[in-house]
Image (cartoon, rainbow, N blue to C red):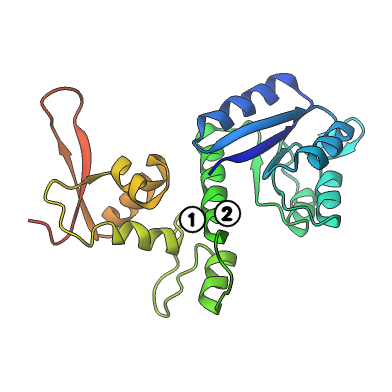
Amino acid sequence: MEFSVLIVEDDPKIAEIHRHFTEKVEGFTVSGIADSLADAEKMSELFKPDLILLDLYFPEGLGTDILWRIRSRRQATDVILITAAKELEPLQDAMRGGVFDYILKPVMFSRFQDALERFREHRQKLQGETSLDQRDIDRLLHPYKSTNPGEPALPKGIDSLTLKKVQDAFDHPHPDGLSAEEVGEKIGTSRTTARRYLEHLTAVGRLKAELVYGAVGRPERRYFSEHSS
């Protein structure tokens, strides 16, 4: 599944960085770059992107104006606000407008990648859903909260539904273990996302990790269920 991204940024150098970052994340393509709010309005209606990477401050106004226009026409586009603004007020306004994430400049690629991968996971959960129960709704609205009473809340970046998929990948014996890339292929996520979940399961004692040395090349980190010999 490919997700289209519109970058709204008036600094050409920063816009190019965000384009480069976006194209490094699997499953995302840049459909356009807008350097003004007027262009952003036209392009968001024309392209109807899945995601907008939106700067906050423009000479002619605030990026949140675009956010609220998208919401007013009920367009199925999510927004990640990328800004240097550290004040509480713009964050509150962005949250009321339903931004998917809020990233401070200068943007680190690891944080940028994490945001896009969580967005992808969120959209994938919505695919094919026709009827929801309370557990499904809780997983969508509170992805880091444990859905099982008595269990601690999951750390940031770990979603309970994806975590279960990773655990299920080890239901069958794998004497040689599984790599992050292999797990990612099994559950439909990137290697980076799979590794994040695998490392969490390793930290809590559900999996074991070993460096396996092949005939050539660097050693590979492979994961084994706690019941593996």
Is any part of residue 216 visible from this angle?
yes
Tell me: 111 left or right of 170: right
Is any part of residue 81 visible from this angle?
no
* Residue drawn at the location 86% of the way across and 35% of the way down: 37
* Residue drawn at the location 62% of the way across and 24% of the way down: 17
Q: Are marks 2 and 1 in contact (CB under 8 Å)?
A: no
Residue closest to the eye, 225 or 58: 225
The amino acid sitting under disc 2 is Arg
Residue marked by disc 2: 123
Residue 28 x %, y %:
57, 36
208 over 45 or under it: above or below: below
141 over 115 or under it: above or below: below
| Mark 2 → mark 1, Cα distance in angstroms | 18 Å
Tell me: 198 left or right of 227: right
Q: Earlier in the sequence, mark 2 or mark 1?
A: 2
Q: Secondary structure at mark 1?
A: loop
Q: Secondary structure at mark 2?
A: helix
For the C terminus, the image quarter is bottom left
201 over 9 or under it: above or below: below
Residue closest to the eye, 144 or 70: 70
The amino acid sitting under disc 1 is Lys
Residue 14 x %, y %:
68, 24
Residue 1 x %, y %:
53, 44
Closer to the observer: label 2 or label 1?
Answer: 2
Tell me: 73 left or right of 78: right
Residue closest to the eye, 98 or 34: 34
Image quadrant assignment for residue 92:
bottom right
* Residue drawn at the location 32% of the way across and 40% of the way down: 181
Residue marked by disc 1: 156
